[in-house]
Image (cartoon, rainbow, N blue to C red):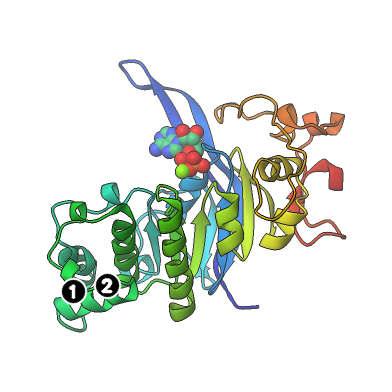
Amino acid sequence: MSEPLLEVNGLTTWFPIRRGVWSRTVGHIQALTEVDLVIREGETVALVGESGCGKTTLGRTIVGLECPRAGAMRWRGQPLPGGIRPPALQRQIQMIFQDPAASLNPRLTVLDLLTEALAVHGLLERSREETALQLLADVGMDSSALHRYPFEFSGGQRQRISVARALALKPALIVCDEAVSALDVSVQAQVLNLLMELKEKYRLAYLFISHDINVVRFIADRVAVMYLGRIVEEGPVETVLTAPAHPYTQALISAVPVPGVERRARQILRGELPSPSRPPEGCAFHPRCPRAMDACRLVRPPFRRPLDREQKVSCHLYS
Ligand SMILES: Nc1ncnc2c1ncn2[C@@H]1O[C@H](COP(=O)(O)OP(=O)(O)O)[C@@H](O)[C@H]1O
Ligand SMILES: [Mg+2]
């Protein structure tokens, strides 16, 4: 197995809830709680879970757009600060967002978009045109794009430009936050294939945030399942998707039709996702869990690998 690129330990983040004219803090949203995660070189780790469970916050914290309140990160074994980082470190981790229309500056041409960060970092080795052309070639586009603006492209092409821009700084890890979710299915497949090719070519690792289990099945090596700011299950993608251990993962997967597989009994989750400002005691999933026991209401289950399983899980059914 390759070296850990990124190690995340006990990562915890909360946001104040402010109310009224004085913006008084009336509570906290617990966005991430004690998150542990390892991403190895060249590996794709998918992060799944319902909207609002903390996926984007984890991605943003890893790229340094958000400062964690507690916990530690390491990059190739060295401490990785939260928030602003030295440029040499910052370059290593890039992010691609769901909506390239919002993340690409509309006033810059593709040439500028692809080369501005390199110029800022003083890393332009060749002319800006040559550099941009190489990046465009990497994402299957050509010189006709150079002097055009983001709005002149289709959604799929815009996302290719975002990928090219992320590649410019030669990162080792790219956080893809719902990067293909807004695209039509056929375009989605093209961009996914592109990401897979680039991963091989440049030995990239991805943290691939998605709510689409079938996309995750296609692209990921491992998958981590989040619920209310915590990782509740994590392991090889095949294992977690075909033999999920946590009742939450089971429900999440049972809701997804799998091509070629007879539909399993669909488990409907009871109730709403509880407010992250007041996560339930014990196991945070217990109010919605079809298999909740007394212990689940009182004691938080440890996150560990049961002897007969390949994945780690946080659930009293296995302790
Ligand atoms: N900047 C912020 N200020 C306040 N609350 C936030 C902020 N960013 C995220 N949150 C809250 O943190 C929780 C996790 O959000 P997010 O990470 O965006 O989840 P996901 O990406 O899984 O949908 C949500 O309850 C969200 O409302
Ligand atoms: Mg999100």
Q: Is residue 132 left or right of residue 220?
A: left
- Amino acid type at circle 1 is Ser
Compute the Cα span from label 1 to label 2.
8 Å
Q: Is residue 13 left or right of residue 224?
A: left
The residue drawn where x is 29% and y is 63% is: 161
Inspect this view and state whether residue 133 appears.
Answer: yes
In the image, 201 versus 153, the foreground residue is: 153
Q: Is residue 71 left or right of residue 99?
A: right
**Rendering coords of residue 233 (x, y %):** 70, 51
Q: Secondary structure at mark 1?
A: helix
Give the residue number, with chain letter if any, for mark 1. Answer: 143
In the image, 103 versus 172, the foreground residue is: 103
**Rendering coords of residue 288 (x, y %):** 72, 29
**Rendering coords of residue 155 (x, y %):** 31, 53
Give the residue number, with chain letter if any, for mark 2. Answer: 136
Q: Quadrant of residue 190?
A: bottom left
Inspect this view and state whether residue 319 appears.
Answer: no
Q: Are marks 1 and 2 in contact (CB under 8 Å)?
A: yes
Task: Tell me if the residue at label 1 has its CB under 8 Å from ligand 2.
Answer: no
- Amino acid type at circle 2 is Leu
Mark 1 or mark 2, earlier in chain: 2
Q: Secondary structure at mark 2?
A: helix
**Rendering coords of residue 119 (x, y %):** 18, 71
| 10 lies above or below 32 | below
The residue drawn where x is 36% and y is 65% is: 90
| 299 lies above or below 198 | above
Q: Give residue 8's mark.
A: none
The residue drawn where x is 74% and y is 60% is: 239
Task: Tell me if the residue at label 2 has its CB under 8 Å from ligand 2.
Answer: no
Estimate how packed mark 1 is, as few (under 14), some (14 to 19) or many (20 or more) residues with alpha carbons within 10 Å.
some
Give the farthest residue toward the bottom: 126
